[in-house]
């Protein structure tokens, strides 16, 4: 069995809680090298998962290590340049949602990936939940959706209410899961009417949309 050699950019809490454990359980995957700006996080992650090659500059990692794909798990407002660099090196890429913080960023990454023949994936994991797959199967059997209500709530009591000092809002960073699930089940949006509000906050935190 051929092993897929992964380079991993990011050693934060989410990567360590979700992605590193998942990858290390796969028989046909090896994490060949990892990178993080924070030396303490980098060395702690390397020791935990027995990864020998570590870097603080992702470009050095890409130059020195032969890789099949790169996981890029970092704050979304720092994602674009690193992802584009990897795609232009013709590396397959996995990123977490959101895939960019503007439409231009997202579409640009998609075009560059297609041009370079790269396989890509965004971490919209709701599509793989058994219940969601069952619901989609029922929709396909019964015909198109006529009405669907999706809600997304997140309790921020006792936690920081904004995302990266306001660089990204809750819709873009978290509730995008609901948007993706609706598109996956019902198809592309044709019309949209929406309102955005700041409820007891300096940042936009309430999003309501009617889509067709």
Image: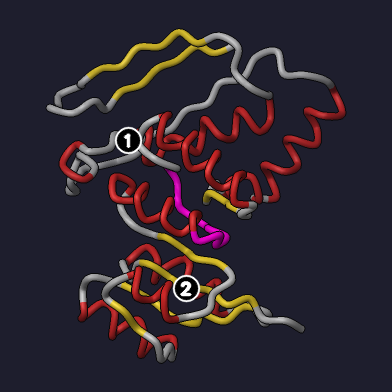
Residue beneath disc 2: 7
Residue 129 percent across, percent down from the top left: 64, 50
Q: How many marks?
A: 2
Q: Quadrant of the C terminus?
A: top right
Corner quadrant of residue 52: bottom left
| Residue pictured at 68% horizontal, 24% vertical | 186
- Furthest toward the right, the residue is 141
Residue beneath disc 1: 170
The image shows residue 5, relative to residue 176, as above or below, that is: below
The span picked out in magenta is 89-98
Q: Which mark is residue 193?
A: none
Helix, strand or loop for disc 1: helix
Name the residue nearer the viewer: 194 or 70: 70
| Residue pictured at 34% horizontal, 75% vertical | 60
Helix, strand or loop for disc 2: strand
Helix, strand or loop: magenta stretch: loop
Q: Could you tell me if the residues under marks 2 and 1 are in contact, i.e. CB atoms within 8 Å? A: no
Corner quadrant of residue 169: top left
| Residue pictured at 47% horizontal, 64% vertical | 71
The image shows residue 77, relative to residue 136, as above or below, that is: below
Name the residue nearer the viewer: 127 or 77: 77
The image shows residue 71, relative to residue 176, as above or below, that is: below
Residue 128 percent across, percent down from the top left: 66, 50
């Amino acid at each position: 069995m051929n092993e897929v050699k992964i380079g991993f950019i990011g050693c934060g809490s989410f990567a360590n809680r979700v992605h590193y454990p998942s990858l290390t359980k796969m028989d046909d995957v090896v994490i060949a090298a990892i990178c993080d700006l924070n030396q303490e996080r980098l060395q702690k992650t390397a020791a935990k998962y027995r990864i020998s090659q570590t870097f603080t500059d992702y470009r050095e990692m890409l130059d020195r290590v032969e890789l099949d794909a790169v996981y890029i798990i970092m704050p979304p407002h720092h994602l674009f340049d690193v992802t584009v660099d990897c795609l232009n090196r013709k590396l397959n890429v996995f990123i977490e949602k959101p895939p960019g913080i503007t439409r231009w960023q997202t579409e640009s990454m998609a075009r560059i990936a297609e041009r370079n023949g790269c396989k890509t994936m965004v971490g919209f994991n709701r599509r793989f939940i058994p219940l969601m797959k069952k619901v989609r199967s029922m929709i396909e059997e019964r015909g198109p959706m006529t009405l669907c209500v999706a809600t997304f709530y997140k309790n921020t009591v006792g936690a920081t209410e904004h995302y990266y000092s306001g660089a990204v809002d809750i819709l873009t960073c978290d509730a995008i899961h609901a948007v993706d699930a609706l598109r996956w089940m019902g198809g592309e949006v044709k019309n949209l009417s929406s309102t955005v509000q700041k409820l007891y906050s300096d940042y936009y935190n309430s999003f309501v949309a009617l889509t067709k």
